[in-house]
Image (cartoon, grey):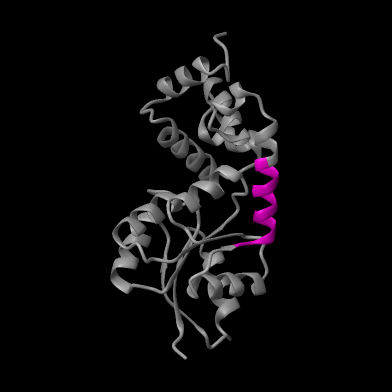
Amino acid sequence: MDKIRLLIADDHSFIIDGIVALLSNDAKFEVVGISNSGKDAIHKFELLHPDIVIMDISMPEISGIEATKLIIGEHPAAKIIALTQHDDIEYILEFLKVGGLGYILKTANKNELIEAITSVNNGSRYISSSVSKIMVDGLISSNKRDDSEKEIPLTKREIEIIKLISDDLTNNEIADKLNISLRTVETHRRNLMQKLDVKSTVALIRWAIQHKIMSIK
């Protein structure tokens, strides 16, 4: 049986080392490449043509979602699994929308990772049980929201970050206040700009005021 050739894209070396260690004793898998940014993941895919890409969402230069979109735009048969800490339904749906075939959280165990890789390699989608629950809960919650809430395409965390940006906090200050990493804040901020199609902090705040996420002080 041919080995399943893997490209692992994550900007934390200890995550990559952990995945490699988990799969090193399984003869079915071969890690053929690693990437530390979304841009490099695209380059490595073109160079190596792996069977499966394991892609983080929070990545330097461009996000894992954008990298997935660009790879699949050029290679519609590409098979990409998100392995991420992001458990917001909006990220899950956006990743699946651009063509990702699997979504698991970094809290997953070895068996779940192997099941995801095997399922996607065989042509199936794979959504972990914890992610499926998030999706079901999110859909139920969305049905309970009023129309004004449905018009705001942002996660609770993104709304928090917009409010803190409007308070003139830096990315470092936001990270400290929310007890999250600077890279996560940068990813949220970049995704906000792309999602709302704005080019500046001023335009971002203007959008928030128009949609009553914040008010003029």
* Outermost residue to the top: 217
* Quadrant of res 158: top right
> Quick one: 17 or 192, which is closer to the camera?
192
**Rendered location of residue 9, percent (x, y):** 45, 63
Q: In the visual, does 203 lie left or right of 145?
A: left
What residue is drawn where x is 53% and y is 88%?
27
Q: Position of residue 67 (x, y in %)?
A: 38, 54
Residue range in magenta is: 127-139
Q: Is residue 22 above or below residue 214?
A: below
Q: Quadrant of the C terminus?
A: top right
Residue drawn at the location 33% of the way across and 72% of the way down: 49
Query: Horizontal and vertical percent for residue 79?
Result: 43, 66
Q: Residue at x 41, y 36 (%)?
A: 194
Magenta stretch containing residue 119, yes or no? no
Q: How many marks?
A: 0
Q: Is residue 199 above or below residue 7?
A: above
Residue furthest out toward the front: 143
* Residue found 37% across the figure and 66% down from its top: 77
The x, y position of residue 175, in whole percent, is 59, 38
The reply, left or right, for residue 182 in relation to residue 141 is left
Main SS, magenta region, reads: helix
Quarter occupied by residue 150: top right
